Each structure stands twice: as C-alpha cells, then as structure tokens.
Image: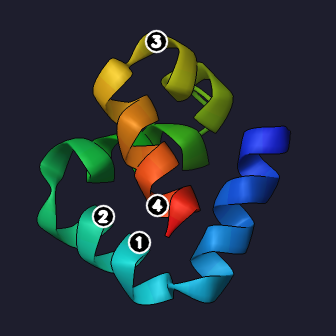
Amino acid sequence: MRIGRKLMSAFERRPRAFHVAAIGLRPAWRAFARVTQGHTTFAGLARSHGLGRQSMEMLIRR
C-alpha cells in the first residue's frame, strides 16, 4: 500500500510524466495493464523487477 500511495502522490504532482511513460514505453504499459487487470501489484513489480523499482523510485523522487 505504501508504494501505491507514493505513486499516487507523484502522479498528482506530475501526471504527464506517468502518461508519457505508459504510452511511450512498452514495458511500462504492460506493467500498468497487469496491475489494472489484477495480475500483480505495484509492490510486486517493485520487488521482482529491478528496472521497474528504479523507475518508480525516480518518479516518486521528482
């Protein structure tokens, strides 16, 4: 839940960055689709995908 709240806060600050990433980067789109379809969670992605974790951390820090 914590990473979800952090990502939501970051999205509220910079929605365009999230949309550009989701539309422009196929892995980001697939990850978002998997979360919205209930196949995984943002926390699960952060645990299992190093690049995904780094990307989420970058978006949260900005």
23 in relation to 29, above or below = below
Residue type at mark 2: give it: Ala
| Alpha-carbon span between mark 1 and mark 2 | 6 Å
Q: Earlier in the sequence, mark 2 or mark 4?
A: 2
Neighbor class of circle 3 (other Cα within 10 Å; few <14, some 14-19, many 20+) is: few
Question: How far across and how far down the image is residue 46, in percent?
Answer: 53, 26
Q: Do the residues under discs 2 and 4 have CB atoms within 8 angstroms?
A: no
Q: Is residue 10 above or below residue 28?
A: below
Query: Which residue is disc 1 drawn over?
Result: 18
Q: Are marks 1 and 2 in contact (CB under 8 Å)?
A: yes
Q: Are marks 2 and 3 in contact (CB under 8 Å)?
A: no
Q: Secondary structure at mark 3?
A: helix
> Residue 22 has which mark?
2
* Residue where numbered disc 4 is placed: 59
Q: Are marks 3 and 4 in contact (CB under 8 Å)?
A: no
Q: Residue at x 26, y 77 (%)?
A: 20
Q: Measure the alpha-carbon separation of dots 2 and 4.
A: 12 Å
> What amino acid type is highlighted by mark number 3?
Ser
**First reached walking from the N terminus: tag 2 or tag 3:** 2
Foreground disc of the pair 1, 2? 1
Whether residue 56 is situated above or below residue 45 in the rendered picture: below
C-alpha span from label 1 to label 3: 20 Å
Residue drawn at (38%, 36%), measured in percent from left and top?
A: 54
Residue in the picture at 51% in, 85% down: 14
Q: Closest to the observer: 1 or 35?
A: 1
Q: CA distance from mark 1 to mark 4?
A: 8 Å
On the picture, is 3 further left or further right than 32?
right
Disc 3: which residue: 48
Q: Nearer the viewer, mark 2 or mark 4?
A: 4
Q: Position of residue 30 (x, y in %)?
A: 30, 43
Q: CA–CA distance between discs 2 and 3? A: 19 Å
